[in-house]
Structure formats: C-alpha cells, structure tokens
C-alpha cells in the first residue's frame, strides 16, 4: 500500500486529485491537507511514499513545505502542483529536490504517469538503503573490548577527514574491516571503494594494475585500460599488503600522493586523480625501510594516521560476541537454524591460542556448527576444534 498526501488549498482540485488517485489503484491510500502548515504537521507525524503539493497556498506555500520536508523526511518524493503563473517557480522547485510538477487543471494521463514514476523512484531509494545496510553488515566490526573500542573511536575521528591511514596488524585480525569502516563513514562513501591486494599481483603487473596502461605498452596490452587509481577517483583506494609492493611501483604511488596525478604505463600523459589512500600491512615497515625494501618517504606519506589492529589473543573478551556473530551469519549462509554454544564451549574457545586470529575463529565456528550437536558443547570443541 502506497501512502500519498495531497496538499491543496482549493477544495475542488483537492477532491479531483484524491478521486483520480483512489480510482486508479486500490493500493493507493490517500490523505488530504487543506494548506501547507497542516500538510507539514502531517508529514512530521506520518511516513508517506509521495506528496502532491500545491505551490501557492496560505500560511505556508509549497516551496516552504518542500524545503521543510526535505530536512525531516528527505526520501519523500514531491510532485508540485502549479498554476499557469507558477511555472517558473515549479521548475525552480525541481532544483530544490522536487521529483516533478504538473499544471492545473491536471491532465489525467500525465498525473498518473508522474505518480507511478515517483513511487517507483521511492521504491528504488528504499531498496538501495536496504542494500547498503546489507553491505555494511558484511563489514561489521564486532567487539566491545578496550582495544576495539579505541579503534572505533579513532575511526569516528579520522573517517570524515581525507587523512591517509596506515593499518597494521597480523594476518586475519580484520585490517580490511577497518578500511571499509573508514570509507563507509567518510564523505566519500557514495563513491567507489577499490581494493588492491599488492601481494597477490605479480611485481611486473602491479604498475599496470594500479595506474593502467595504453595499447601497445607491453605484449598483452591490446587496448587502453584504466588502473585502480582512476577507477577509485572521488573515492577510496585500499592498498592491502603494501609492504609487498615493488620499489618501482612505490615510486609511482609516491608521485600520485604528492601530486594527485598518475600516468598510465606506456604514456607520459598526466591524469588527475582525487583519491583517498588507505593502506595496510602485516610487515614491520620500519624494518623493511632499514633493509632497503620500502621507501621511507612513502612510509611517511602513508602513515599520517596509524591504526594498529590487535590480535584476537589481545581481545579475548570479544570472543563470545564474535562466536554469536559468526554463528548467526553462517546459519544464514547455510540456510539452517542458528546453533547456540554452551558456556563451557565458549570458555574453552576463549582459552585457545588464536594464531590465525579472527579468520581462524570463524573457520572453527563454522566447523562446530556443521559437525557439532544441537547445542555446541565442550565435547564438540574437544573433538572438532582441537588446536
């Protein structure tokens, strides 16, 4: 059922609009307001899928209603109703965020088409919000221990800025989650988040992967190709395992950070990029610098903000929450009912030496859910999670 509010001070036109909408579809629930002030009161109290709003009204005109509504319910589409002399104002309301406008007297087909289109648009906005929430859940940072709380506080301060961040920590600790959180809480969240695993790309291909190439730059370069920096423009690029990057690629990354420019392999043409760089490594970069494998000037460019992600052994208090989180997630993925873990099983798992960190814990939880009893017991842990 789509809820529609009609705000119109001329009662005859208001009745016509309500009649057209209610006769068009049983799925339209239509409410009325005789002026802008009354309409705004209703909008604040109730949720609507669409508002049809006259422009010239006493007490509060349509432009004022539109501006006020966008502050409290920005997702509601507005269709403005304009008299002949209001056309310029109607066009201006679209700049202020109105979906469209219709002229008086309303043309039946034009009105119904515009209403359907506006409702479709609202549905898409809602679907996108749900999808974004699902994406966010995939990168949820679970935990209430002091180390994790400190990282969450740091992210809240750092994310709104464009400061570069270097995330350090052992494999499996959740460095990627920190990078995603920084992006999602930043002003760049609607732009791309591009991940590059520097350790997984051969050294001879890393420059092409990061900066792109032009046709003929090397044997397999059969056409021009944009690199990750270009793809991430206006967004965030996450350079995972940056300690494994070749020195020649490091030099180009340094230039990109210094000048906000890159050039494709095989070209001397500069391309401007606006990218926030977040990097991560499990290596001691200061030691890598001493041994000549990492550029010191690049390190200082990247490490404006340093975030050290603790090992799971350093945040054992979070293990019960992580077990519950993984158990729920795995049950959803497998299409089975969630399993509970006994207190004894949880205590046993808290006492393990988690060398593989959170990644290892997730694998163990999945194994116990598949192989364990209706409630995962200490005996199940002894049988299937022995270290």
Image (cartoon, rainbow, N blue to C red):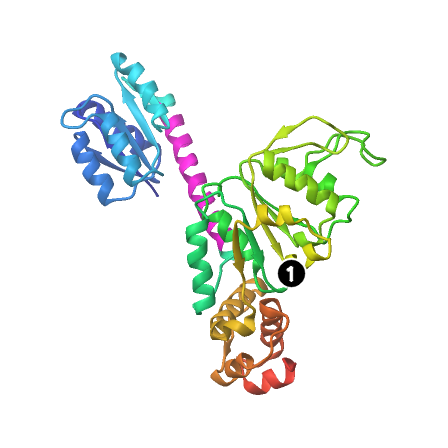
Give x and y (percent) for residue 36. 19, 30
- Residue behind mark 1: 284
Does residue 256 appear left or right of residue 132 in this picture?
Answer: right
Tell me if residue 32 can be seen: yes
Q: Which residues are magenta?
A: 111-136
Whether residue 132 is in magenta: the answer is: yes
Q: Is residue 293 above or below residue 50?
A: below
Pick the residue in front: 225 or 368: 225
Give x and y (percent) for residue 336. 55, 68
Badge 1 crowding class, 10 Å Cα cut-off, few under 14, some 14 to 19, many 20 or more, is few
Give x and y (percent) for residue 157. 42, 51
Instruction: Identify the residue at image location x=34%, y=22%.
Output: 101
Whether residue 219 is in magenta: the answer is: no
Give x and y (percent) for residue 37. 17, 33
Name the outermost residue toward the bottom.
379
Name the outermost residue toward the left.
59
Q: Quadrant of the N terminus?
A: top left
Q: Quadrant of residue 92?
A: top left
Does residue 298 appear left or right of residue 323 in this picture?
Answer: right
Q: Is residue 166 above or below residue 49?
A: below
Q: Quadrant of residue 281?
A: bottom right
Instruction: Identify the residue at image location x=64%, y=61%.
Output: 282
Does residue 384 appear left or right of residue 318 in this picture?
Answer: right
Name the outermost residue toward the right.
219
């Amino acid at each position: 059922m789509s809820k529609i509010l009609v705000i119109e001070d001329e009662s005859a036109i208001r009745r016509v609009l309500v009649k057209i909408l209610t006769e068009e579809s049983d799925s339209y629930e239509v409410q009325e307001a005789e002026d802008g002030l009354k309409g705004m009161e209703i909008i604040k109290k109730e949720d609507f899928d669409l508002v049809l709003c006259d422009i010239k009204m006493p007490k509060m005109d349509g432009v004022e209603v539109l501006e006020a509504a966008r502050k409290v319910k920005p997702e509601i589409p507005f269709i403005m109703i304009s008299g002949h002399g209001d056309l310029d104002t109607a066009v201006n309301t679209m700049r202020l965020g109105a979906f469209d406008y219709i002229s008086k007297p309303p043309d039946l087909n034009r009105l119904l088409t515009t209403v359907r289109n506006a409702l479709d648009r609202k549905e898409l906005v809602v679907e996108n919000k749900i999808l974004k929430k699902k994406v966010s859940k995939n990168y949820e940072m679970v935990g209430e221990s002091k180390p994790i709380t400190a990282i969450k506080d740091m992210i809240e301060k750092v994310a709104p800025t464009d400061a570069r961040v270097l995330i350090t920590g052992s494999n499996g600790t959740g460095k990627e989650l920190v990078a995603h959180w920084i992006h999602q809480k930043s002003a760049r969240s609607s732009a791309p988040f591009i991940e590059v695993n520097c350790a997984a790309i051969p050294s001879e291909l890393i420059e092409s992967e990061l900066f792109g190439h032009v046709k003929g730059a090397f044997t397999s370069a059969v056409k021009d190709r944009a690199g990750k920096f270009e793809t991430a423009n206006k967004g965030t690029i996450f350079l995972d395992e940056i300690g494994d990057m070749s020195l020649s690629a490091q030099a180009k990354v340094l230039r990109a950070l210094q000048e906000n420019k890159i050039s494709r392999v095989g070209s001397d043409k500069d391309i401007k990029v606006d990218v926030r760089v977040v990097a991560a490594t499990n290596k001691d970069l200061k030691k890598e610098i001493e041994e000549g494998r990492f550029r010191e000037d690049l390190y200082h460019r990247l490490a404006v903000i340093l975030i050290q992600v603790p090992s799971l052994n350093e945040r054992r208090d979070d293990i019960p929450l992580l077990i519950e989180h993984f158990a729920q997630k795995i049950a959803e993925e497998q299409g089975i009912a969630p399993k509970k873990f006994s207190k004894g099983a949880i205590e046993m798992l808290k006492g393990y030496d988690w060398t593989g960190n959170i990644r290892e814990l997730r694998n163990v939880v999945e194994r116990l859910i598949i192989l364990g009893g209706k409630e995962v017991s200490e005996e199940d842990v002894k049988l299937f999670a022995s270290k």
